[in-house]
Image (cartoon, rainbow, N blue to C red):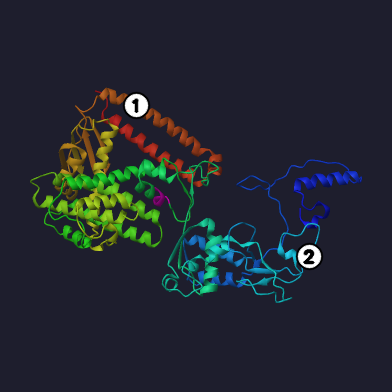
């Protein structure tokens, strides 16, 4: 208790409460005591109850500074990514009150306030704060004044409080460069270009740095602010040592690799949204690193002439596109790479790093590895491949180099390792010193992409038939493709080896009048009727039982899903995302039921 408590001064709050009760009862003023249940604030670190204590505090008038900071954003001098954070930022500045900058903590910048103690006030318990022990007004000064301007006294004491942590932090953009001295570093590095930070300190720090930058330097401290989310656990809780839900990055690096950790953090950093991280999130990233490593190993084990990395990548890509042995798959992957590089360039410019990484993930895994490398093997592994084989080397290695360059900022270690493996002992800059690809519009080919999409649709349909009809993975099949016109038939015939290789087929009958063989599974894709004869490949009776059982399960799921969607309470109360998820599931189940019925009909009774 302070001196204002009179005879209770010096007691703790608990001791004081007991003493007051004793005095009230002794004087006959205490009618009764009663317990009340209420909320008591406690320190999040030590758990001790926090109680307010009225004391003198120092405030900073921020009216002019907040107006200037808001004006800088409205004038486009400070731009936020994502833009959705602009409005709350401006709302905070527009309604900002005077800022209490004094703090009663151990560390920080001491308040530049001094007190003259010539006329110290007395009392039973002298006040701890010098402001309560003097009649002279406080003296603002950076250095200790020689004397009190009010009375001439020389017994001066500095205010024991420190400035708010965020006050000190607001000085950071220029104080680290020697300010207030006009240093070379200050001239060179202030203002900077981009601030990357989390939304939880948008007001505490970002706004105040802008306010102080304009007030002291007359320039905004940065021109762009990228707001990222907060890393949370899989339940959406903020990570905390007290909760024990912290994902240890060192542990994740040891278990999955540093590149996988970096990939997960970037791929889930959707602008302005928090990310939920758990150990499970790293498995897919580790698999992606392995996929990239295996692609590099395949290229290293099967190399052609003149495929050293480095130099003008764009020129190499264009030269590969004009090679004499170029094929549809080559033109397609060069086109898709150019589109992916351009999309990544746009996403990075907009600070949408998650979109950039997801674009690369899809291109590398689903297009380059799953499709192009498999098709390139037809020529790469053929010693008599001639010009087509050399073109496959050129295209594969140029696109792989482009992938390494694009992924290097996110996955620097595995990409650099693959890069150096192509030229061991070589000199010159690593990947970090290479030009970042931005896409080559000349290489974009609508015709090649359309043709490959049709081929991929047919191949995908055959693979689905093989999977759904339990055709053994190593078993060769025969394809019968009935085309709607001669142009389609001619196109599929030209690229028949693509079909045979990826469908694991030893024969492909292609035409406009191809009949459906008996006991065949069928599908339609890209305007082509696909028949796969199953005689000799499967046990028909066993497959009929399996398909009937699968159809029964799908029908039961369909009934439950339809009943759920027809429930008016579900439609009225379910979130839109949940309703859309159930509708998508219904459509997929109907499609699966239809295919199962078709397969049952195709292998009918003997």
Residue 590 image-quadrant placement: top left
Q: Nearer the viewer, residue 505 or 551?
A: 505
Residues in magenta, as a range: 264-268
Magenta span main SS = helix
Is 390 within the magenta? Answer: no
Q: Nearer the viewer, residue 502 or 191?
A: 191
Q: Is residue 30 visible?
A: no
Of helix, strand and loop, which one carries label 2?
Answer: loop
Q: Position of residue 373 (x, y in %)?
A: 21, 46
Of helix, strand and loop, which one carries label 1?
Answer: helix
Instruction: Tell me the crowding category of disc 1: few under 14, some 14 to 19, or many 20 or more residues within 10 angstroms, Cα based.
Output: some
Q: Position of residue 111 (x, y in %)?
A: 62, 66
Q: Position of residue 405 (x, y in %)?
A: 28, 56
C-alpha separation, residue under disc 2 versus residue under disc 1: 97 Å
The disc, 2 or 1, on the residue closer to the chain's N-terminal end is 2
Instruction: Tell me the crowding category of disc 2: few under 14, some 14 to 19, or many 20 or more residues within 10 angstroms, Cα based.
Output: few
Q: Is residue 429 above or below residue 574?
A: below
Disc 1: which residue: 548
Q: Do labels 2 and 1 touch, CB within 8 Å?
A: no
Disc 2: which residue: 121
Outermost residue, right side:
28
Location of the C terminus (image quadrant): top left
Residue 444 image-quadrant placement: bottom left
* Left or right: where 579 falls relative to 532: right
């Amino acid at each position: 208790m302070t001196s204002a408590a009179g005879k209770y001064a010096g007691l703790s709050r608990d001791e004081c409460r007991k003493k007051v009760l004793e005095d009230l009862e002794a004087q006959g003023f205490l009618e009764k005591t009663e317990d009340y249940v209420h909320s008591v604030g406690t320190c999040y670190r030590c758990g001790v109850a926090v109680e307010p204590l009225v004391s003198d505090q120092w405030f900073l008038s921020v009216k002019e500074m907040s107006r200037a900071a808001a004006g800088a954003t409205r004038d486009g001098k400070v731009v936020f990514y994502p833009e959705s954070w602009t409005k709350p930022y401006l709302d905070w500045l527009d309604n900002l009150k005077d800022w209490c900058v004094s703090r009663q903590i151990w560390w920080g910048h001491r308040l530049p306030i001094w007190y003259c103690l010539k006329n110290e006030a007395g009392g039973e318990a002298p006040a701890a704060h010098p402001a309560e022990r003097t009649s002279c007004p406080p003296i603002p000064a950076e250095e200790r004044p020689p004397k009190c301007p009010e009375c001439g006294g020389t017994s001066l004491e500095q205010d024991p409080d420190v400035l708010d942590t965020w006050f000190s932090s607001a000085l950071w953009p220029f104080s680290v460069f020697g300010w207030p001295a006009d240093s070379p570093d200050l001239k060179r590095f202030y203002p900077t270009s981009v601030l990357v930070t989390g939304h939880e300190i948008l007001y505490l720090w970002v706004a105040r740095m802008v306010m102080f930058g304009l007030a002291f330097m007359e320039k905004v401290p940065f021109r762009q602010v990228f707001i990222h989310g907060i890393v949370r656990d899989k339940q959406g809780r903020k990570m905390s040592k007290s909760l024990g839900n912290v994902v240890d990055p060192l542990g994740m690096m040891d278990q999955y690799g540093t590149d996988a950790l970096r990939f997960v953090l970037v791929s889930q950093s959707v602008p302005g949204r928090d990310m939920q991280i758990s150990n499970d999130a790293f498995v897919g990233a580790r698999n992606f690193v392995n996929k990239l490593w295996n692609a590099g190993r395949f290229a290293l084990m099967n190399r052609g002439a003149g495929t050293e990395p480095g130099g003008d990548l764009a020129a190499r890509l264009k030269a590969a596109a004009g090679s004499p042995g170029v094929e549809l798959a080559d033109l397609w992957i060069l086109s898709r790479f150019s589109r992916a590089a351009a999309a990544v360039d746009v996403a990075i410019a907009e600070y949408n790093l998650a979109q950039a990484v997801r674009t690369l993930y899809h291109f590398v895994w689903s297009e380059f590895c799953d499709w192009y490398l498999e098709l390139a093997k037809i020529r790469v592994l053929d010693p008599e491949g001639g010009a087509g084989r050399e073109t496959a080397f050129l295209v594969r290695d140029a696109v792989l180099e482009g992938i390494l360059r694009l992924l290097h900022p996110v996955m620097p270690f595995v990409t650099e390792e693959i890069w150096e493996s192509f030229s061991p002992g070589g000199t010159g800059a690593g990947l970090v010193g290479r030009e970042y690809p931005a896409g080559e519009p000349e290489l974009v080919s609508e015709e090649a992409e359309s043709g490959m999409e049709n081929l991929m649709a047919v191949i995908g349909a055959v693979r689905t038939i093989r999977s759904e009809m339990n055709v053994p993975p190593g078993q060769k099949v025969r394809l019968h493709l009935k085309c709607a016109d001669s142009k389609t038939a001619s196109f599929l015939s030209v690229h028949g080896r693509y079909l045979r290789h990826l469908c694991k087929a030893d024969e492909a009958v292609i035409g406009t009048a191809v009949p459906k063989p008996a006991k065949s599974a069928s599908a339609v894709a890209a305007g082509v009727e696909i028949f796969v004869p199953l005689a000799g490949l499967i046990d028909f009776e066993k497959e009929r039982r399996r398909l009937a059982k699968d159809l029964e399960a799908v029908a039961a799921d369909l009934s439950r899903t339809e009943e759920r969607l027809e429930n008016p309470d579900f439609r009225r109360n379910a979130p839109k995302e949940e309703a859309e998820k159930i509708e998508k599931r219904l459509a997929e189940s109907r499609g699966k039921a239809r295919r199962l019925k078709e397969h049952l009909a195709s292998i009918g009774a003997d």
